[in-house]
Amino acid sequence: MNPLPPGSRWANLPRRRAIASVGALIAGAGVVGAGAAAYGSSPADRDFNVRDYGATGDGKSDDTKSLQKALDAAAGTGGIVFFPPGTYVTGRLILPSRVHLRGSGGDATTLRLARGANSAILESDRFEQESAAGSDAGISGFSIRDLTLDGNAAQDNPVGVGLRIYGYGYELADVTVFNCGADGVVSAWGTAGDLPAPSHQMESRVTGLRTHDNGGHGVNFAGPHDSMFLNCLSFQNAGTGFHMNGNGYGTLMVNCHAWGVRQDISFELAASGIGCVNCYADLDGGIGVRISRNDCRWVAGYVQGANHAGDTPEIGIQFVPGAKPEEPASATIDTLIRNCATAAVDFGAERGLSSIRATLSQPGVAGVAGSGRGWIGQPAGNTQVEITHGLGHPKNLVVRPAFDLRVQDTPAAPADGQVRLFARDNDGETQLCVRFPNGEVRVLAAE
């Protein structure tokens, strides 16, 4: 390797420190380029290698104090905290604002919760106080990238959590969280709509997150609102894959996938205005998508059941009562649903003004107990519904909008160029009929 040129900003650094700093720049180039100019100093002044603070990453030693020293050192000015490859055993680490954690890749850098710590691995500063107050404070302007959080649940950590955040304006990218006794990722924030300058945003951006085999929810997201999830996976968790709730309203999810026999619910839309585009709910018993708030969207989606006919209901899309009597309403559904043994759609508590379009590929004969159904319950009268269950299937439902025809005597023939739709009683059987101008009556459907 060529020696460092005279006058180089790396020349006065120890060789090991210089190499680590270059590695940190490579691992977090996107943030360094923007962050250095913002802070008005060189990237080298904002790099903090955890090994320089005594962390070993040997998978045995307790590195808590050393890791916290590196985070505290970065907290004063903001900057990158770099984790070389290794497994870092740690207790709770307090994460400040404007600090950017960079691992060496999810399979190379792991933070493992120490035996008996029974806490979060990474937790935002003043998490308990700010979340209890529902304030507009919390940490901001931070990021975590290219590492794994191991909750080490079997080693006396029954309620351990991978990541607990109360804050805004942050980014998670290519982070894996698994083996936590409780939730994998917890995020919350208050109700403030806008922040004063110099803040540019409040939303979080989550890309390539993987949460699996946790004892609670994979992702328990209650803010900040209007956030974005892209290409995320949540599987084999004991709770819900993606639990979107509280002040997480307006969050957009794209290309996200939740699956696993352990998960009762793949996607829980319990905050208003959640939008899911091209997302995939894969279930084996339980609920694919459960909606309890207004203005939620599941568009270009796919729900795959396992034709699970056991004690646990298996439902593709389910509407359940929300926090207010008029909820859930104004949903937009456009999806394919396959092999959900109890029902493709449970209209249940749907309150109206929704647009629901579903193409079904369901097992068994519609309406026969235990063999699979198209849907259960009835949509509200002003909801638009188009459910297709195979061409000409007797359980098809197409209503735009919903309306009732009362049984009546056969009406007079209509004028030329018109038809007259009516319902009549024929020996106790209700028939849906049409009458043509020539007087002919044709039965379209019978009870």
Image (cartoon, grey):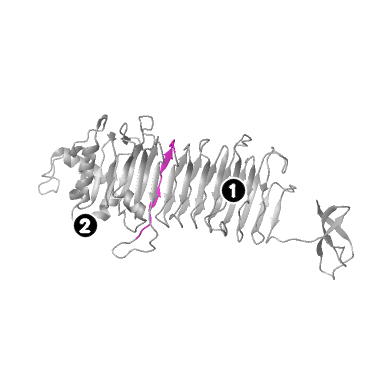
Q: Quadrant of residue 198?
A: bottom left
Q: Residues within 10 Å of mark 1 (few under 14, many from 20)?
A: many
SS label for mark 2: helix
SS label for mark 1: strand
Provide residue 101's location: percent of width, then percent of height: 28, 45
Q: Main secondary structure of the magenta part?
A: loop
Provide residue 118's location: percent of width, then percent of height: 34, 36
| Front residue of this view, candidates 204 and 127 | 127
Q: Quadrant of residue 313?
A: top right
In this rendering, the answer to whether 112 lies above or below 186 is: above
* Residue that numbered label 1 is attached to: 317
Residue shown at 53% from the left, 43% from the top: 265
Q: Quadrant of residue 193?
A: bottom left
Between label 2 and label 1, give the one nearer the viewer: 1
* Residue that numbered label 2 is attached to: 39
Residue shown at 36% from the left, 36% from the top: 151
Q: Which residues are magenta?
A: 201-215
The numbered mark, 2 or 1, whose residue comes first in the sequence reads: 2
